[in-house]
């Protein structure tokens, strides 16, 4: 059997992507397709008093202008608008009524025969409002912030309980550090514009191509909003041009396109503009206070982590913002306080590793400051505080090779050559800084269903309604299926991104790799069992007495694992049984064992070179050492980490959604002024996967989509301190912040 | 509904502009289109604000005489529709190095292949990277209309943030660079929040002519993005002119000589930072001319 | 990159003032004309060659080259990432030079030779850059990829980039939010080595 798992297999969807053949949501063209252009609010809060669409309607080629006043019926209760991952509260309802809850809120949809006409006519819609005072500044809403409520829904996060006597421990600590840290709102900005193409089929059913990380989530949601039967709506998303969490919840482009398609009984496409995408979710701004207390020898004795994060006025979005602190390091005393500031903005949402990069920016900056206070090497401090247990829940880790990450990362980086004194290292006229930080994320697995259809000619189709948002899901599914079915990779075809396929959770939280690979393993076992039954019926079958768990599939054969000479070819078994096709569908549930914590870890080392006079920072080197369980594909996994490091560079130096608080509106709602790194901002990045065996699931997979970003921003900020002696506690570290 | 005109001669373009800007017909004037790189980016932003985008266009890219670089006596003429890539590829004296360096830092290559010099000055952004080098070259703007031709200094052509002295029926035909000594050297430094694809926080163009005796025969220093209009630092130029070009000069670049700048506090930087950065870039540009050979210095 | 078309584009360019569209009832643009209802005569005719295929179309003059490709010619390989000239996802080659197709009207390219991502492979064989992008995993979601590859084709033709740093500089007009830059540079270096 050619082992594909663990190899650098090129993406099976690579040819489609490099030739332009891969089709994304707004690229399904059908005859008679109408184009919708969205009109958005220019105020942050209030209500619409007059909405005049007459000029738009007069433009030739305009079919209709849909508003809250003339739209067809939509559900009138919150439950109908709740999607699989909705936070507590009352979800936003697009085009529902005259109320304005945030700036750039969709208020009308102009539908026309061409996109040019729709766009032009949209500019002719005139709106009058009654404005109400709004608040969009987290610092203005900070004092009114309310403590989070542990959620009733299983997708929410329950904050960990305090332990020990943190106040007393802080008071008695030989060395203390306390600081306030700020991370601004950030937007996902996937390259693909949010869009949906709704095809109105001849039988009245709708085929919806949507940009989403969860086709079934969108399908259920649309059924709820429009009172449609599940069989009447099929949602597809074969390729997704990046999402990073923005596509976990259904977005309003799909609602608007379906609304128009139903109203007009025509096929409709709605594509948002780049500025309009700033009305989707965002990583919440986070104001944090961290207090650390340590003994003189560097033993951490107390952690207090308080946070205020932003959400909308109508939903309570939060994640585990404060809990990471007491989990990452050994510390007998810990306490947490997490409050929500309600702002007149859309609801914040998951963005790559929600809560962890922000929380660990504060924690890992604070640890660096503590190391300075202790006059300890920052890596040495981490080793002295190394935790072998999850103290939040008093349990061991299923696996934790973080120590090895520190060792291999430090070695590859050359950390032992670091002169600890700030401003001590130079390269010509530039200051050089070396910083490091730790990362931690969850290793999650979700219930998933996988269907495998094997044909006698030795090809198999593997189907699951999950998504591939660029993570490499197509490829790892094929690799796992090929290895387990004992077939060549090219004989495997993957179907995903279609709501009619077997159930999948949304693709997020780094859980799909573990969920779908183990899901494939379960279904392959069922296929194998059926094959074994057929093989036993072959005359003089060498497998007549074999038990299912004693055989495997390899090289097109059903093979006795104890004696490789005893085998029956899959083709023979199926032919003798008169079976042309074997199809199995199985659901795999993750282990219910809560006795161990499951996490991925990383150690990140960063080098910066700084032109101090003008504050220009270059991140010249990053080494990211990852302990993430088994790596299914070293090529795509490495890409996940490389990309995450680039995200970390952006978070550290560039990314910030700037709001004009007078207008309650994003000022830099475009990618010329919302800066993400460009090619020339990225230099040498080295990714190391340390060996880590984990038996939480049969394949030992933990997931790698998020861990790579966590710890990058603080490693860079710590390097900036090391280079300049200047501690920047609010991101991003723009040029002017280093200026005297 | 939209109007799209693509004349192949300057005469036809001017007569169309004259008609379009006639009395009583001014509500939707023709927007002159060349590279489009400053016009299109406003479109999605205008949609987000429910503002209309220009609908009626006069495409001047098919008018041969508007594109290309040629000599006119001692002057060099750059056609208004000449692209940044054309400028980079052209053989020009060292006095134009600053302009070339600016051209290489405008957007990505895709923008440089489309964006034009004329568009950059007519757009009149305070952060227009093409303007500081042109001001340092004492550029003039050749303007034509059916009423006739005129030439005005660039410094007076640009009147404010997004404001120029161009009448509705006029077209910028060329940018005229009067004669330069072969010994003039120039340099452009740009500071942005990322390496590329970035609007300047501040930019500096410096043109320097050193006499045989080592003194500064002429120096012109322009700072972009630090005032409503890129600004020549006349007081500083006067301070340095006639002096020997050596390290002691750096200390003469004092903050007071930058008081003419009126930088804004905006999303890209504070006014304090801009003012300080302008001075640092000027000092670096000056220092760069003291090096044995002139190299491109990216800030 | 592109070959000469077998058929020359229309001879409209001889007309000194090519009036692509005249508002109904008005000789010149005006507020009145702008409000008038357009008719089919509002269309402009455009002839261009895309991937060696000649097209003659009647278009709304506001149609961008990008929308022409995606919506009229069903060449959806060219991507719309910002529609504002800020990301490079829409990069195509016009007469061999890379440009952002979202920034221009299709009508401005009357008579031009356009090469898109769909036109790079020859006789079923991937362009060396396409293969290099696969080999180096120089993409994740794939959305910026056609623009990156077209931009890299332009880069190789320009011949200015020699080092990794120069590739980074001259590829900075193409944003990749997945952050595949490291691998994009490696892929371009591989293709450079072959050319």
Image (tube, grey):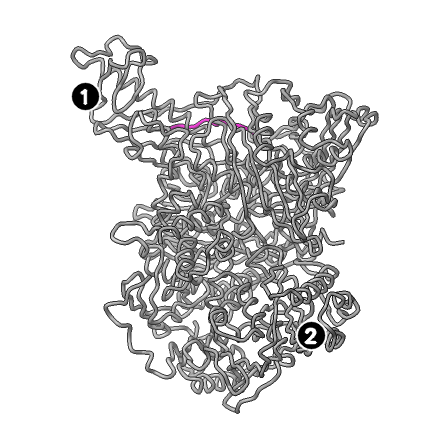
Badge nearest the viewer, 2 or 1: 2
Image quarter of residue A661: bottom right
Question: What residue did someone put label 2 on?
Answer: B214
From the viewer's side, name the closer residue of A184 and A729: A729
From the viewer's side, name the closer residue of C17 and A716: A716
From the viewer's side, name the closer residue of C110 and A207: C110
Position in image of residue B180 (x %, y %): 59, 81
Residue A276 vertical position relative to residue A461 in the rendered view, above or below: below
From the viewer's side, name the closer residue of A109 and B169: B169
Question: What residue did someone put label 1 on?
Answer: A572
Q: With C174 as the anchor, is B159 left or right in this view? A: right
- Secondary element under disc 1, as helix, strand or loop, is helix
Image quarter of residue B165: bottom right
Residue farthest toward the front in the current orientation of the protein: B213
Position in image of residue C151 (x %, y %): 42, 57
In the rendered picture of this protein, how many numbered marks are placed on residues? 2
Residue range of the region highlighted in magenta in the rendering: A442-450
Residue B152 vertical position relative to residue A120 in the rendered view, above or below: below
């Amino acid at each position: 059997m050619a082992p594909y798992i663990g190899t650098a297999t090129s993406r099976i969807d690579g040819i489609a992507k490099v030739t332009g053949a891969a089709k994304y949501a707004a690229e399904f063209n059908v005859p008679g397709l109408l184009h919708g252009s969205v009109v958005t609010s220019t105020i942050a809060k209030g209500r619409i008093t007059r909405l005049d669409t007459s000029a738009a309607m007069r433009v030739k080629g305009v079919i209709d202008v849909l508003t809250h006043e003339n739209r067809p019926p939509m559900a009138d209760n919150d439950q109908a608008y709740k999607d699989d991952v909705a936070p507590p509260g009352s979800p936003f309802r697009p085009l529902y009524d005259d109320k304005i809850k945030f700036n750039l809120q969709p208020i009308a949809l102009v539908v026309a025969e061409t996109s040019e006409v729709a766009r032009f006519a949209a500019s002719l819609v005139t709106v009058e409002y009654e404005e109400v005072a709004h608040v969009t500044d987290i610092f203005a809403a900070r004092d009114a912030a309310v403590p989070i409520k542990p959620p009733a829904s299983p997708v929410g996060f329950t904050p960990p309980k305090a332990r020990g006597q943190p106040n007393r421990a802080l008071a008695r600590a030989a060395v203390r550090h306390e600081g306030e840290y700020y991370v601004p709102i950030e937007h996902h900005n996937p390259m693909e514009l949010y869009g949906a193409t709704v095809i109105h089929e001849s039988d009245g059913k709708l085929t919806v191509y949507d940009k989403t990380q969860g086709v079934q989530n969108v399908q259920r949601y649309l059924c709820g909003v429009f009172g449609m039967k599940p069989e009447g709506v099929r949602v597809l998303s074969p390729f997704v041009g990046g999402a990073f969490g923005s596509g976990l919840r259904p977005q309003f482009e799909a609602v608007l396109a379906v609304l128009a398609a139903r109203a007009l009984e025509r096929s409709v496409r709605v594509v948002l503009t780049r500025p309009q995408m700033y009305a989707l979710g965002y990583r919440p701004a986070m104001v944090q206070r961290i207090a650390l207390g340590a003994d003189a020898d560097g033993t951490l004795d107390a952690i207090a982590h308080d946070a205020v994060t932003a959400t909308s006025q109508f939903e309570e979005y939060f994640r585990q913002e404060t809990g990471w602190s007491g989990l990452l390091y050994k510390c007998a005393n810990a306490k947490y306080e997490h409050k929500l500031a309600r702002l007149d903005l859309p609801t914040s949402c998951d963005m790559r590793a929600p809560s962890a990069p922000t929380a660990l920016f504060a924690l890992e900056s604070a640890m660096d400051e503590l190391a300075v206070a202790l006059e300890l090497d920052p890596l040495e401090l981490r080793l002295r505080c190394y935790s072998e247990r999850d103290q939040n829940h008093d349990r061991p880790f299923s696996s934790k090779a973080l120590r090895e990450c520190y060792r291999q990362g430090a070695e590859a980086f050359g950390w032992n050559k670091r002169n600890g004194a700030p401003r001590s290292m130079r390269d010509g006229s530039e200051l050089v800084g070396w910083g490091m930080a730790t990362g931690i994320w969850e290793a999650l697995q979700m219930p998933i269903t996988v269907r495998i259809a094997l044909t006698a000619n030795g090809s198999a189709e593997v189907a699951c309604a999950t998504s591939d948002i660029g993570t490499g899901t197509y490829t790892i599914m094929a690799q796992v299926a090929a290895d387990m079915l004992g077939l060549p990779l090219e004989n495997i075809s993957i179907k995903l991104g279609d709501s009619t396929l077997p159930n999948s959770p949304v693709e997020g939280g780094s859980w799909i790799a573990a969920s779908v690979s183990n899901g494939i393993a379960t279904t392959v076992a069922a296929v194998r069992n059926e094959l074994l039954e057929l093989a036993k019926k072959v005359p003089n079958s060498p497998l007549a007495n074999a038990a299912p768990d004693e055989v495997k599939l390899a090289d097109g054969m059903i093979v006795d694992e104890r004696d490789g000479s005893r085998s029956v070819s899959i083709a023979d078994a199926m032919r003798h049984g008169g079976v042309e096709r074997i199809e199995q569908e199985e659901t795999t549930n993750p282990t219910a064992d809560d006795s161990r914590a499951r996490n991925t870890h990383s150690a990140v080392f960063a080098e910066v070179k700084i032109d101090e006079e003008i504050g220009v920072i270059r991140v010249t080197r990053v080494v990211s050492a990852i302990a993430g369980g088994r790596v299914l594909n070293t090529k795509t996994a490495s890409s996940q980490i490389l990309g995450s490091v680039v995200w970390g560079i952006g978070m550290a130096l560039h990314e910030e959604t700037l709001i004009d608080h007078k207008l309650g509106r994003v000022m830099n709602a475009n990618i010329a002024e919302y800066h993400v790194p460009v090619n020339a901002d990225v230099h040498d990045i080295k990714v190391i996967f340390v060996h880590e065996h984990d038996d939480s699931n049969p394949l030992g997979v933990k997931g790698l989509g998020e861990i790579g970003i966590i710890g990058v921003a603080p490693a860079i900020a710590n390097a900036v301190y090391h280079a300049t002696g200047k501690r920047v506690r609010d991101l991003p570290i723009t040029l002017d912040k280093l200026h005297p | 509904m939209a109007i799209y005109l693509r004349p192949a001669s300057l005469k036809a373009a001017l007569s169309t502009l004259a008609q379009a800007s006639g009395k009583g017909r001014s509500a939707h004037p023709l927007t002159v289109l060349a590279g489009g790189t400053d016009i299109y980016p406003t479109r999605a932003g205008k949609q987000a604000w429910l503002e209309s985008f220009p609908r009626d266009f006069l495409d001047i890219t098919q008018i041969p005489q508007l594109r290309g670089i040629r000599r006119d006596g001692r002057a060099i003429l750059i056609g208004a529709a000449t692209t940044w890539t054309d400028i980079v590829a052209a053989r020009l004296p060292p006095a134009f190095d600053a302009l070339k360096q600016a051209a290489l830092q405008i957007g990505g290559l895709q923008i440089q292949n489309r964006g034009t010099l004329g568009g950059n000055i007519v757009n009149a952004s305070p952060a227009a990277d093409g303007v500081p080098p042109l001001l340092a070259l004492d550029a003039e703007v050749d303007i034509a209309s059916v009423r006739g031709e005129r030439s005005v200094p660039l410094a007076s052509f640009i009147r404010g943030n997004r404001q120029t002295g161009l009448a509705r029926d006029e077209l910028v035909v060329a940018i005229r660079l009067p004669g330069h000594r072969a010994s003039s050297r120039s340099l452009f430094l740009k500071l942005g929040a990322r390496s590329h694809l970035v609007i300047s926080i501040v930019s500096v163009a410096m043109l320097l002519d050193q006499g045989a005796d080592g003194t500064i025969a002429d120096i012109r220093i322009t700072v972009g993005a630090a005032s409503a209009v890129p600004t020549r630092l006349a007081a500083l130029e006067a301070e340095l002119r006639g002096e020997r070009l050596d390290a002691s000069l750096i200390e003469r670049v004092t903050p007071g000589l930058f008081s003419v700048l009126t930088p804004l506090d905006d999303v890209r930087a504070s006014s304090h930072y801009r003012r300080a950065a302008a001075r640092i870039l000027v000092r670096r540009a000056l220092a760069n001319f003291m090096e044995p050979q002139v190299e491109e210095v990216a800030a | 990159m592109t070959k000469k078309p077998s058929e020359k584009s229309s001879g409209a360019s001889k007309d000194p003032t090519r009036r692509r569209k005249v508002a109904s009832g008005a000789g010149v643009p005006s507020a009145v004309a702008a409000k008038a209802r357009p008719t089919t005569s509002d269309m402009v005719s455009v002839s261009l060659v895309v991937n060696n295929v000649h097209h003659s179309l009647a278009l709304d003059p506001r149609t961008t080259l990008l929308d022409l490709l995606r919506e009229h010619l069903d060449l959806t390989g060219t991507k719309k990432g910002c529609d504002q000239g800020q990301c490079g996802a829409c990069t195509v080659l016009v007469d061999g030079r890379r440009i952002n197709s979202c920034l221009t009207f299709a009508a401005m390219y009357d008579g031009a030779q356009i090469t898109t991502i769909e036109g790079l492979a020859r006789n079923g064989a991937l362009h060396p850059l396409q293969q290099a992008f696969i080999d180096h995993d120089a993409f994740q979601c794939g959305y910026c990829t056609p623009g990156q590859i077209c931009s890299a084709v332009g880069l190789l033709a320009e011949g200015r980039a020699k080092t990794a740093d120069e590739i980074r500089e001259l590829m900075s007009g193409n944003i990749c939010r997945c952050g595949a830059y490291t691998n994009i540079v490696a892929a371009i270096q591989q293709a450079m080595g072959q050319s």
